[in-house]
Image (cartoon, rainbow, N blue to C red):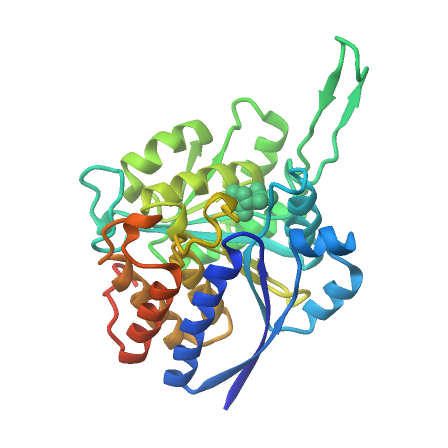
């Protein structure tokens, strides 16, 4: 039988709850589709940091490299100053594992309530490709005249041809197997240096994809178009910070942060890809069973697709969509079922094959 080795990083807050639910769904998928996984749980996160002072160590990186994929929950805690765990673990992992793009589908499933009035699922099926290793996320920045009224902070954005080309090329390739439309999202009217590099990369790489139609939208305009007319978009490529922002908006359009999935992809076999719900650790609701495990389950579906388990991936996505479409609310007490109960329901739907037809797939 086929076997895959997984590193599981449950993390903090609701991370372990949604990860447990996803693992139960994985058990069901394995049974049904006849593959196995070997799972290593890696204790990264706030607790581990407070106990040991360790963030992402060289040893952990080496260990993670030995796995076929990483399933990640969420990291972040009010007990640790903001930025330490995020930069020291999540961003460090994305860099160390050369996870060049962050793939974030924005898909509205049938029956799932969206705050966008009148939006039909057929009108909302796009993928945001976020450059995942640089931009404003890597420049260290600097401050002068600290402690005086002249205090001045400089925070730059790094854009290398190499990384931008890698992300843009991935986005073109994805568009060429989808509906053949690629949109660059940036702010070229203000960020002239970075913007023209992105435009030049789009033009050069585009010559290799003559069948993909391209388009450009400023990031502020994107915040209007994405909720109002998501059907305009098939694949959107953007930089790290814009991608972070517009994918939260995308998540809201598809029903909320609890529903959205992501894949941090290594494209060259030089590291391990990592799959995580886009929500955070939500410490305010941790331990209550109020977190929606859909984002984690849909991230598992992306993981299975990357491992070549295409049928299992489609089934997990369809089963998650089917269960989501029946919920009275998408998070909190009003969801009517706990995180664990929803995991069990999605697992049962995987076992029975009762999935929701996913538009466009
Ligand atoms: C995300 C998160 C992270 C990011 C944070 C936690 C560093 O918001 O995955 O979108 O900004 O990339
Ligand atoms: Mn984010």
Furthest-top residue in view?
A: 149
| Quadrant of the drawing holding the C terminus | bottom left
Q: Which residue occupies 28% across, 34% down? A: 228
Residue 330, visible in the rendered structure: no
Left or right: residue 256 compared with residue 13: left
Q: Is residue 137 above or below residue 361?
A: above
Q: Is residue 7 above or below residue 87?
A: below
Q: Where is residue 46 drawn, in percent x and y?
A: 66, 51
Image check: 293 left or right of 129?
Answer: left
Left or right: residue 81 versus residue 120 is right
| Residue 245 placement (x, y as % from top left) | 49, 37
Q: Measuring from the top left, give residue 120's x and y in whole percent.
A: 20, 47
Q: Nearest the camera: 210 or 319? A: 319
- Residue 118: name its quadrant: top left
Q: What is the residue that sits farthest to the bottom in this orientation?
A: 1
Residue sticking out furthest to the left: 118
Name the residue furthest front: 288
On the question of residue 315 being in view, the answer is yes
Total numbered badges shown on the rendered structure: 0
Residue 79 vertical position relative to residue 195 in the rendered view, above or below: below
Q: Residue at x 39, y 45 (%)?
A: 251
Residue 106 drawn above or below residue 159: below
Residue 292, position in %: x, y?
38, 55
**Viewer-nearest residue: 319 or 328:** 328
Query: Which image quarter: residue 310?
Result: bottom left
Residue at x 40% of width, y 71% of height: 313
Nearer to me, 228 or 182: 228
> Residue 147 falls in which quadrant of the image?
top right
């Amino acid at each position: 039988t086929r076997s895959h080795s997984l590193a599981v990083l449950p993390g903090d807050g609701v991370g372990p709850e949604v990860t447990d639910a996803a693992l139960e769904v994985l058990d069901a998928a394995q049974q049904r589709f006849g593959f196995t996984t070997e799972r290593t749980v890696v204790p990264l996160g706030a607790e581990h940091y407070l106990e040991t002072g360790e963030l992402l160590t060289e040893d952990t990186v080496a260990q993670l490299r030995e796995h076929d994929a990483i399933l990640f929950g969420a990291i972040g805690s009010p007990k640790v100053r903001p930025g330490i765990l995020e930069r020291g673990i999540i961003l460090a992992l994305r860099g160390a594992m050369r996870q060049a793009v962050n793939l974030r589908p924005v898909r509205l499933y049938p029956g799932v309530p969206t705050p966008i009035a009148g939006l039909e699922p057929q009108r909302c099926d796009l993928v945001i490709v976020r450059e995942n290793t640089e931009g404003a996320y890597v420049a260290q920045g600097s401050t002068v005249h600290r402690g005086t009224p002249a205090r001045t902070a400089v925070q730059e954005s790094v854009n290398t041809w190499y990384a931008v080309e890698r992300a843009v090329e991935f986005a073109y390739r994805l568009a060429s197997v989808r509906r053949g439309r690629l949109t660059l999202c940036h702010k070229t009217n203000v960020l002239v240096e970075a913007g023209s590099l992105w435009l030049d990369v789009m033009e050069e790489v585009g010559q290799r994809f003559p069948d993909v139609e391209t388009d450009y939208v400023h990031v502020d305009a994107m915040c209007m178009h994405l909720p109002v007319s998501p059907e305009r978009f098939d694949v959107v490529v953007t930089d790290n910070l814009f991608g972070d922002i517009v994918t939260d908006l995308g998540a809201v359009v598809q029903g909320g942060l609890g529903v959205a999935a992501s894949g941090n992809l290594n494209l060259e076999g030089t590291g391990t890809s990592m799959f995580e719900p886009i929500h955070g650790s939500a410490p305010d609701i941790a331990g209550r069973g109020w977190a929606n495990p859909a984002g984690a389950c849909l991230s598992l579906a992306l993981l299975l697709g990357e491992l070549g388990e295409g049928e299992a991936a489609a089934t997990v996505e369809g089963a998650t969509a089917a269960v989501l479409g029946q919920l009275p609310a998408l998070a909190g007490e009003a969801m009517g079922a706990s995180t664990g109960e929803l995991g069990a329901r999605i697992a049962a739907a995987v076992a029975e094959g009762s999935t929701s037809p996913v538009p466009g797939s």
